[in-house]
Amino acid sequence: MHNFFVDPSSRHGNCYVIAGNDYNHIKNVLRMNEGDTFLVSSEGKSDLCTLKAFEGDSVIAEITEENFQNTELPVKIYLFQGLPKSDKMELIIQKTVELGVYAVIPVEMNRCVVKLDDKKKKSKTARWQAIAESAAKQSKRTVIPEIYDAVPYKSAVAMASDLDMFIVPYESKNGMTDTVNALNKAIKCKSIGIIIGPEGGFEESEINYALDAGGITVSLGKRILRTETAAMTAVSMCMLNSEMNSDGE
């Protein structure tokens, strides 16, 4: 079933008025007809709707069942991703949005090969946000995760330290024991940050800085993972832990 995101102002009584690119997509690409059903997501909830009519350059979607489904996690996962090379960031955003991440914050770290000036930051962020929206639609999310402009490492750590907890996949001295302990702690959290290093990994000074700010190092296993694999593994780990302990909510 197709899913469309709309601004709350597009709701009028028991209907949504959908215009712009989504109107064109519904009418000319999907070739939907009156009576077809689809989801409309707004303000963190999805309503089941029926195509009532085409009026001018708008689609009138009548709500047939409110709060039809909730696909969001009980915890907000913020992914702080060290800037990777080439198009790896696009893959990371696509897959972690599918997995339920709440926001992605690109991070400028000492061993990042990629350097973005202010102009490139804006264009990259716009591109990445579009990928997040597409992934959110495909995975039937009820919100579109926000993709931030790239930030310096110390700013990222400051943001992460404001969350209920934040973890740093690294060489954890107690191995998976540290991971299990962190996941047990995460059960009671409403927000979790995950900081992932770039291809070159963390510098020791960066790890120490995160630990001084309250970060917790965890292991993702005995194997060495690429940065994009580490991001998806860490988000998957937190996603499964959250859903398995959510009492079916």
Image (cartoon, grey):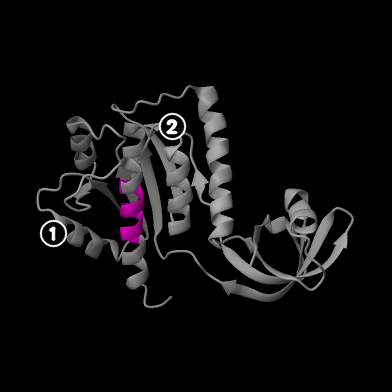
Q: Can you tell which quarter of the image residue 44 is in?
A: bottom right
Mark 2 lies on residue: 86
Q: Residues within 10 Å of mark 2 (few under 14, many from 20)?
A: few
Discs 1/2, front: 2
Residue 89 location in percent, x, y? 44, 39
Range drawn in magenta: 230-238
Q: Please, which residue is most extreme toward the right here? A: 56
Residue placed at 38% from the left, 47% from the top? 79
Local secondary structure at mark 1: helix
In the rendered view, would you say 121 is above or below 78? above
Residue placed at 68% from the left, 54% from the top? 7
Residue 8 appears in the rendering: yes
Q: Please, which residue is most extreme toward the left here? A: 174
Local secondary structure at mark 2: loop
In the rendered view, would you say 66 is above or below 237? below
Q: Earlier in the sequence, mark 1 or mark 2?
A: 2
Q: Residues within 10 Å of mark 1 (few under 14, many from 20)?
A: few
Q: Which mark is residue 177?
A: 1
Q: How many marks?
A: 2
Q: Can you tell which quarter of the image residue 187 is in?
A: bottom left
Tell me which amino acid carries mark 1. Answer: Thr
| 144 sits left or right of 221 in the view | right
Residue placed at 48% from the left, 35% from the top? 149
User: Quick check: is 227 in the magenta stretch?
Assistant: no
Residue 155 location in percent, x, y? 36, 34
Determine the CA span between mark 1 and mark 2: 34 Å
Tell me which amino acid carries mark 2. Answer: Ser
Residue 201 location in percent, x, y? 25, 35
